[in-house]
Image (tube, helix red, strand yellow):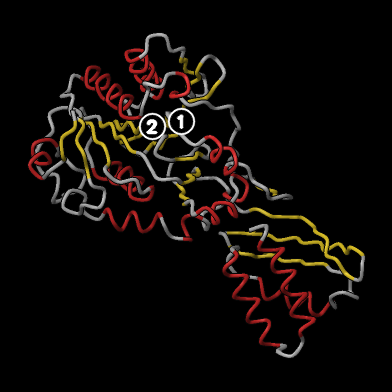
Amino acid sequence: MLIPFSMKNCFQLLCNLKAPAAGFKNRVKSGLILQSISSDVYQNLAVEDWIHDHMNLEGKPVLFLWRNSPSIVIGRHQNPWQECNLNLMREEGIKLARRRSGGGTVYHDMGNINLTFFTTKKKYDRMQNLKLVVRALNAVQPQLDVQTTKRCDLLLDGQFKISGTASKIGRTTAYHHCTLLCSTNRTFLSSLLKSPYQGIRSNATASIPSIVKNLLEKDPTLTCEVLMNAIATEYAAYYQIDNHINLINPTDETLFPGINNKAKELQTWEWIYGKTPKFSINTSFNVLYEQSHLEIKIFIGIKGGRIEICNIEAPDHWLPLEICDKLNSSFIGSKFCPNEITMLTNILHRTCPEDDELHSKWNILCEKIKGIM
């Protein structure tokens, strides 16, 4: 049963915060099931942060259901250049987000259900949560063959991954979140989660590719709404709480004081890209010059999302060494992103305003470099 999460509901259901907050002052006697009315990935991730940071979960577990418009979500310690096709994402207007939990990269859209299980640190149990999801699926369709794995994934028919897991364990609270593929765009999923970038060396956590399948492909009655209701029912029965899915607005500061600042932080370049572990790219490409191809070698070291080492090597007769050195030094300290390189290229053009041939070569180089960003 869906009910709006009004201030009245709020005062009836939630309480005992780690820090005082205007929206949650009364007492919650047991657990709670929440569902976001937003499809914005940053807003929904902010809800996770807010609950983790502010709610006292002792004896009051929370299940949070949420779905996002098309977006890619990487783990806390991952490298987006290594995990996804950023150029394609920009072309398609797909958002990139970095969550605060570990784990691998996932594609979200409205056909993918996200489940976040909040408990105290002592009660944290990923396998228990996944078994609850399996029971919910079997309650709807007893013929489904869904099994948990040692890696805390869910497999359909013993081979197709329908759910992946990640978690964050704090000092006193913890959460485990997982996906559930219902009717996601598998074409987008496979193309976006395939990095085209060559020559990356990184110690960042790498995702493990899997064969996936939608539950709706197995049974057309398994819609997102049916599955969310089934999981909520099983959760309510397990924790002996009211089977109410409480609808929440993640931007409501009266319910979640300070949450919009959390959402803004999750959207910053410094968080999404700047938190990438140190890495390097060592690659090369060819340019056409007088009916022949010349090899251009590039080595770029990136720390905190910014270029700290840049070494572009080009044949001296095509681009003199002093010009290469000027390019190399101009890129040091800049963000490793296409917009920054475009801006630097325009600045370089102004240093030699009359040299069209040099401008053309700079443009070729910069377009190639932007292609690996």
Q: Is residue 30 left or right of residue 132?
A: left
CA gap, disc 1 and disc 2? 7 Å
Position in image of residue 274 (x %, y %):
52, 58
Residue 266 against residue 346 in the figure, above or below:
above
Q: Nearer the viewer, residue 202 or 343?
A: 343
Residue 166: quarter of image: top left
**Residue count near mark 1 (Cα–Cα under 10 Å), binned few <14, some 14–19, many ≥20:** many
- Residue type marked 1: Thr
Residue 254 is situated, as x and y percent measured from the top left of the image, at: 16, 52
Whether 283 is drawn above or below 163: the answer is below
Instruction: Identify whether 217 is placed above or below 305.
Output: above
- Earlier-in-chain disc, 1 versus 2: 1
Is the C terminus in the top left, top right, bottom left or bottom right quadrant? Answer: bottom right
At a point 54% along the width and 14% down the height, the residue shown is 158
Residue wearing tag 1: 165
Question: Most extreme residue toward the top, as rendered?
Answer: 143
For this rendering, which residue is in front, 77 or 171?
A: 77
Q: Residue furthest front?
A: 220
Residue at horizontal 24%, vertical 35%?
Answer: 34
Residue placed at 54% from the left, 38% from the top?
A: 189
Q: Nearer the viewer, residue 291 or 22?
A: 291
Circle 2 packing at 10 Å, graded few (<14), some (14-19), many (20+), is many
Above or below, 229 relative to 202: above
Task: Say which residue appears at 67% left-offset and 57% top-offset.
Answer: 372
Q: Give, as a three-letter code, the residue at label 2.
A: His
Q: Position of residue 98 (x, y in %)?
A: 46, 48
Q: Quadrant of the N terminus?
A: top left
Q: What secondary structure is found at the residue carrying circle 2?
A: strand
- Secondary structure at numbered mark 1: strand
Q: Quadrant of residue 130?
A: top left
* Residue 176 badge: 2
Residue 298 lies left or right of residue 77; in this view the side is right
